[in-house]
Image (cartoon, grey):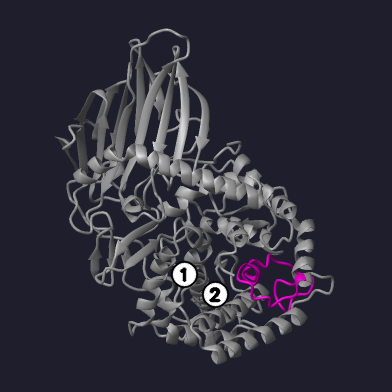
Amino acid sequence: MKLRPPALPLITVDPYFSVWSMADRLTDKAVCHWTGKPNTINGTAVIDGTAYRFLGEGEAPAMKQLSVEVEAFSTTVRMEAAGVVLTLFFLTPLLPDDYEHLTRPVSYLKISAAASDGRPHRVSVSIRASEELCLNEKGQMPVKTEEFTLENGAPAAKMGSAGQPVLARSGDDIRIDWGYFCLAVKGVGAAVCTETGEMSWLCASADLSENSALFTFSYDDIESIVYFGDRLKSWWNRDGKTIETAICEAYADFEEMAVRCAAFSDRLFRDAVRAGGEKYAEILLLACRQILAAHKLVLDRDGEILYISKECFSNGCAATVDVSYPSIPFFLLYNPELVKGMMRPIFRYAAGGVWPFDFAPHDVGQYPLLNGQVYGWARMDLEVQMPVEESGNILLMMAAVCAAEKDASFAVQHLDTLRQWARYLLEKGADPDNQLCTDDFAGHLAHNCNLSLKAIMGIAGLSRILAMLGQEEESARYLAAAREMAANWLKTAANGDGSYRLAFDQPDSFSMKYNAVWDKVMGFHLFPAEAIASEFASYRKRINPYGMPLDNRETYTKSDWLVWTATLAAEKEDFEEFVEPLWKAYHYSPSRVPLGDWYQTTTSLQMRFQHRSVQGGLYMKLVDAAGICR
């Protein structure tokens, strides 16, 4: 990989169990939770009696980092010191269509050693993991530790807070403080112990003189989500499976998982290069684990999948519609059922007798507590809602998943709600009033042309669903309405030079018309090809060193919308030209964080957001290339 990751994924399971290196070298800084708070894990190699660091900070001299390779589910780092090369292979097998492995909270680190000077060496390695992994912050409360032996004979240890406040609070910049972190190792001379002092630690070690060692990091959160009062478990422990059993199963299928994950990554890279070029492909590889680790998969009381996103470093909302919406291209490609899992909480909430509006809600709670919308709930009025945004989002999500599966049966049970939200779009969507859209950080905007596009596409989406269900007459009415709205949009949004406005009442303004991508991806054909081409051509003069701004109000942009906009390009070369500045933004950014989706196009500096699932939107070009929604 030529791309220098702004942060390197190491352990990526879910919003609470997500550990990254936020520096050029693994030894430059302590490894962190995705929020940037310490989740200290240190690694030391003893080579012929001398200690060297290969992970984290410390007094021992640092090994020289030779290379880094990031694939979809793995990170491989090679380190060298004293005539020995260590290969560190971090693997979290989050295969999106394999729920057992997608949810199993076990991540691997395989360490192997080879001589670089042709001489024999005595090598051992050790890992130390701090109490920060099971507390919001170190010292928050006392920690209990326990050493044990797995059924496969591997030594292991676990630690957790003494108080165990399971699912006791929600928030954004917080870390888990219940459940148990576990560390285990298999290899020659494998040993595990606990240490206490200013902090508690779990320590594991093994001899590498002749063999590799396989460490596992795992987290048993006991219960994962509160869902309208129900306390839900994840898929992996839904029937009472213990973490000890899960770790043993992980050891048993490590080799298989490594092969399957490599095959997924290779296929993804080839597809992405073919569709959008090598730099685009590298971005997708780096984004993959982040997208998945910003979610939690649980089962409701009826055994149906709920796939809950956390709105990371935005406000911590859970199951946020305008966070799910941009993420779905990844899931349309690799498992559309997970898109249904994103929508189920919204439909449950809207039908529960509490939601007072005739448009779709924004969210269903604050992670991990899903008991109803928290975004602006204290002032349940239009000022803090996103009526056109969220209604259009859900209609498009449903239309896309039905198209991808070639089956609209999921829509049937929610058809009355979908019709209600489509009626709202028919009434309010052609020229939206002073509303927020998903780009709420930019503030309210009346007459938003891009928001109007979303309404048009959402109505067309319902038309597609109805056609799939054989309701041709009703489908035709919605499609005719969408066509009429589109024809009027072309007249009222035009700047007169082939480009189209930010707002209907703002001549000579501009914005990325990312919502129009569905016209191409789903084959609605509501807008003439020449209109899309002339709008896209106008973007070339807007591009800054690190990408095109979202609109004329500011110089910042959004990575997901940038790729959706690039997907409007008729030629691959134009797509690559539009996306290359995004590659540069991540490659050169001084903001050393998991991929930020909101950043400055003039400096590449992050604008608060990081580790968000919306990076699933980067896969939109692959959705278009595959033609799965047409």
The mark found on residue 321 in the picture is 1
Foreground residue, 76 or 500?
76
Residue 253 vertical placement versus 310 (above, below)? above
In the rendered image, which quarter is residue 251 located in?
A: top left
The first of marks 1 and 2 along the sequence is: 1
The answer to whether 175 appears left or right of 362 in the picture is left
The amino acid marked with disc number 2 is Glu
Would you say residue 523 sits in the magenta stretch? Answer: yes
Q: Quadrant of the N terminus?
A: top right
Q: Residue at x 47, y 69 (%)?
A: 405
The answer to whether residue 39 of the structure is visible from this angle is no
Q: Residue at x 68, y 57 (%)?
A: 555
Q: Residue furthest top?
A: 119
In the rendered image, which quarter is residue 625 located in?
A: bottom right
- Magenta-drawn segment: 500-529
Q: Residue 581 at what x, y percent from top left?
A: 68, 48
Residue 235 vertical placement versus 286 (above, below)? below
The mark found on residue 389 in the picture is 2
The amino acid marked with disc number 1 is Val
Q: Residues within 10 Å of mark 1 (few under 14, many from 20)?
A: many
Tally of numbered tags: 2
The answer to whether 481 appears left or right of 286 in the picture is right
1 and 2 marks in contact (CB < 8 Å): yes
Cα–Cα span, label 1 and label 2: 9 Å
Circle 2 — which element?
A: helix
Residue 477 vertical placement versus 152 (above, below)? below
